[in-house]
Amino acid sequence: MIAWIPFQTPLALPGGWVLWLILPLSLSVTIVYKTLRAEHASRIPRDVAFAMASVLLGLTALGAGLWALIRFWP
Amino acid sequence: MARPQRTKLKPNFAIALFLAWLVPGAGHVYAGRVRRGLILFVTLTATFWSGMALGGVMTADPVNERWWFIAEGFTGVNGLVAWQRHKALTADFEVWLVRQEAFIREARQLPVRAQWELRQAYFDQYLAERQLALVAPVDVVARAYAGVAGMLNLLCMFDVLMLCLMGRAAEPPPPAAPQPEVRP
């Protein structure tokens, strides 16, 4: 593995790890969206938690559905 | 004696828009939504620099990845810093290139278009020697982080613009707690 210097050289990621990096990105999108849309600033944490849970459930369901399609499709 | 009440100035939409571009979240702070502005600043800055940390200096590439670069430009000062780092790298490459006698010998015999392609080939070699070349799959992830941060900041810019134009800039009052029902 090539020595990684953050902000200078790219990180050598194994292929399977790339998928996990979608989670922090989706958290970031959720935080920004809910920060803009929340009725009041005090509601942001709760709204983000609900929206992130929905995103995780949706992604898991989508992944399971696609896996089942590939696995069991004749 | 009653103290004179300070009148709140209506935020200027152009200043709010410029601040929102320059520093993510600053437009919301200027418009009076401090807490939201701070959340946006931390989230967008962290997302952008996570991408830059993953992909290195070649994440912002105005020549080969123009659309991603434009998206990164919406992060304001973050995008400008990334662009300056890329420009410094390109300047260093130019210094290195003029020392390559083989390049100068070959380029003299080629038309302009082919000279550009040869220069690109030497640039790839320069990056590979310094382990700076950004290749799959990290290139997609790094540019997605930095580019998505830019696109999200564009959304924030639009939001603060609309808030200022509609005269709803300041934070609305907290939702009232439900009142207990009073029976006669």
Image: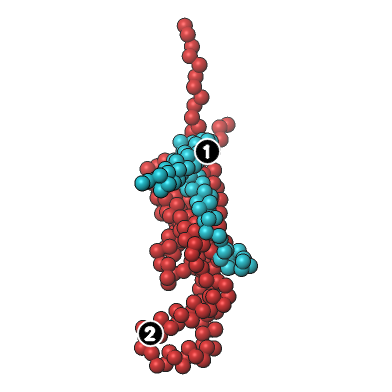
Identify which amino acid the numbered label 1 is placed on. Ala
Quadrant of the image containing the N terminus of chain B:
top right
> Is residue B75 visible in the rendered structure shown here?
no
What residue is shown with label 2? B114
Could you classify mark 2 by the number of other residues whose Cα lies within 10 Å: few (under 14), some (14-19), or many (20 or more)?
Answer: few
Per the image, label 1 sits on a secondary structure element best described as: helix
Chain A display color = cyan
- Residue A31 x, y percent position in the rendering: 50, 45
User: Tag 2: residue type?
Assistant: Ala
x then y, percent, for residue B128: 54, 75
Question: Are the residues flagged by discs 2 and 1 in contact, CB closer than 8 Å?
Answer: no
Q: Identify the subunit bearing mark 2.
A: B
B32 on left or right of B116: right
Name the spot of residue B117 as percent of width and height, x first: 41, 81
Q: Is residue B60 shown to the viewer in this render?
A: yes
Circle 1 crowding by C-alpha within 10 Å: few under 14, some 14–19, many from 20: some
Please identify which colour was used for chain B in the image: red
Name the residue nearer the viewer: B104 or B75: B104
